[in-house]
Amino acid sequence: MDIQPYLDSFPLPAKRGILSDVNKEKTDKAIEEAMKDPEAVASQIVKRLLDPGVEGNDIQARHLLHTMAVRIPHHSRKEKNNKRAKFSLVLAEALSGDHPDRVKAFVIRQLQICGGEEVVPLIGAFLIVEGIADDAAQALIAIGKVSAGQFREVLPKVKNNSILYRNVLHGLAELADESSKDFFLEAIKNEDDECRLLGLWGLTQIGDSSTLGSFLKADQKEKGFSRIKAASYCLKFAEKISKKDATEIYRHLQKTRTLPEEKYLQEIVASAL
């Protein structure tokens, strides 16, 4: 398939790097034609993507791929077909090819828009790859709770890499994954401030009263910004549990947040009690 006519419909940057002279009618027609066989077009586009900074220009290919990723979910629902899933799989399977990491990251960002359960394992493989892991996590979070298993699976593999470990903890907390309770309880004992906060946030997200003792014990150790953030988690946690258990949180804050600058917390707690 020759996709060059589709690409030629998209503008190139002018001398100052600004896109200009967009022919909307021509561009819309090219997109319409490309959407008739999105899988074939996608496979050809990926071959034309370049690592930023190398000689050449792939801006038209990037624009067409992004436009298709944005439109294909609606297109697939309207036509009542599975083209979205097939299109997404073509992109996801290309990730195993010999492409530069920054090209793979771009493809993953498109899957964040159009991908579904069918691409979760293929994206999840990049949660252990520095430089791409953040893009992979964002895409999986966008796909939803069905992605939680991928985060849980790789967590033991990244414990010795603080960047990747925090990234995975963030994903599990964002998805409010109840099956990760033990991971969050482990994280609140970590020496790294951010890991502890992610653990506290994760426990807040799932709102399990059985973790309250460990949660409050960990909260007492936080200082500076972490102390402020932990207090906000305490209040959010209290909103998710029974009034009786919430009272334990309010009493805890009443006892531990006694600095002058924490007066606002005392007022909140007094009102809640």
Image: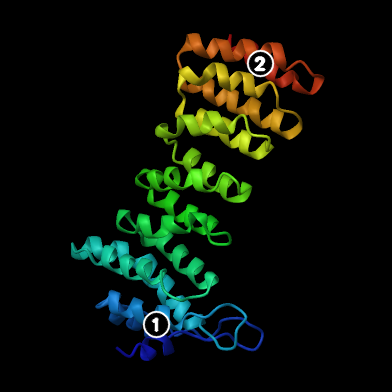
Q: Name the front one of labels 1 and 2.
A: 2
Q: What secondary structure is found at the residue carrying circle 1? A: helix
User: At 35% across and 76% down in the image, what residue appears?
Assistant: 42
Q: Looking at the image, what colour scheme do you see?
A: rainbow
In percent of width and height, residue 258 lies at 76, 15
First of labels 1, 2 by sequence position: 1
Pointer 1: residues within 10 angstroms few (<14), some, or many (20+)?
A: some
Q: Position of residue 175 (x, y in %)?
A: 44, 40
Above/below status of 260 relative to 48: above
User: Residue 188 vs residue 262: left or right?
Assistant: left
Q: Identity of the amino acid at label 1?
A: Thr
In the rendered view, tell whether residue 257 sits above or below residue 173: above
| Residue at figure coordinates x 39%, y 90% from the top left | 4
Depth check, front residue: 14 or 81: 81
- Density class for disc 2 (Cα within 10 Å; few <14, some 14-19, many ≥20) is many
Residue at the right extreme? 260
In the displayed structure, 177 sits above or below 149; it is: above
The mark found on residue 253 in the picture is 2
Location of the C terminus (image quadrant): top right
C-alpha gap between disc 1 and disc 2: 59 Å
Residue nearest the observer in this picture, 196 or 205: 196
Amino acid of disc 2: Leu
Residue at the spot of label 1: 27
What residue sits 42% from the left and 45% below the top?
A: 153
Q: x%, y% of residue 239?
A: 50, 21
Residue visible at 47% across and 63% down? 109
Residue 16, image x, y percentages: 66, 84
